[in-house]
Amino acid sequence: MKKVFSLLSPARASCSRCVLPSRLVATVSDPSPTPTGSDQSLSFISYERKNEDKSTKSPLLLHHSLFGRKENWVNFGKALHHLTKRQVVIPDARNHGNSFCSNAMSFKLMSGDVARLLQQLNIPRASFVGHGSMGGRVSMITALTSPHLVDKMVVESSMPLNTEALLKTYDTYRQACYIYMTLSSNSSDDPVTMKLEADSALKETLPHSITRAIFINSINGTYQAVIDNPDLGRFPSLDGCSFERPVLFIRGDKSSTSWSSDDEIRKIRLLFPNSHFLQIPGGTHDLHIAKHHDLLESVLTFLESENGLQTDFESD
């Protein structure tokens, strides 16, 4: 694929606030542990400026991938906030990080969680950056079912199509969950030893070191929900829905979890007619980690432009 692309240059508490340099106010909300399902508030981090120094453009909501957590996006979120002066909100999804646990887990339910968080924060509309088969798809479903909540959207390493490669990827994650569940029932109580044993046991199933590290560090509250919800890897049918505002689909050219052909682009544009497509050379699934600066530059250009990027991809 060729691209034509023009670039412009502590302990849990209910809520804590601290003032950081550059007039940055950071809010961390980690709901106290409660019985399963009784408190469905999302844990989140929010960065914003004081009133006289804040942007008038839509806030940004960054949504992590399956087995991720908000801390994976802190560096990227801080950089976006510093460069745009927009409020940046980074939540933990249900069954992830410090958010609540629930046996019920679907993209539609998680989209509802995000909608309630925006209402809680008095944000009428946000621009979304969603990563992977969970964060990207939660963002897409929110845009398709509640378009009034979404300004622009960036989808990293994901798409709304149920390809064989994507379904196989989710099956692989479920297999990894079974391995971890078996290992945890027979392993040492020492968390360091457990992580080392898990890393060794999962090397064949999850060969990519970054993917495996994220999985091991975030799996405890997630694996049972993934095992109990086998359809979580499938994007739901949303006949008659479309999102007309600008969307950027971005992938690494070594990723197998996103669009890869003109036919897939045409199908995506049936749902997102105002969509642009960009691939980053040498990038894999986790662009915000391995290709931080390339992704940041691309996202900034898209978000700060009036109508989205002008991109054009042609098959070799």
Image: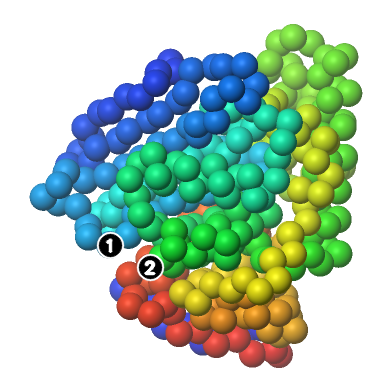
Looking at the image, which residue sits at the far front?
240
Q: SS at mark 2?
A: helix
- At 33% from the left and 45% from the top, the residue drawn is 122
- Left or right of 296 in this view: 186: right
Picture coordinates of residue 273 (x, y %)?
56, 81
Q: SS at mark 1?
A: loop
Split into 4 quadrants, where in the image is the N terminus? bottom right
Q: Is residue 158 above or below residue 276?
A: above
Who is closer to the viewer here, 199 or 150? 150
Which quadrant holds residue 37? top right
State the residue position of label 1: 57
**Contact (Cβ within 8 Å) of mark 1 with mark 2:** yes
Picture coordinates of residue 153 (x, y %)?
48, 65
State the residue position of label 2: 303
Q: Which mark is residue 39?
A: none
Residue type for callout 2? Leu
Residue type for callout 1? Lys
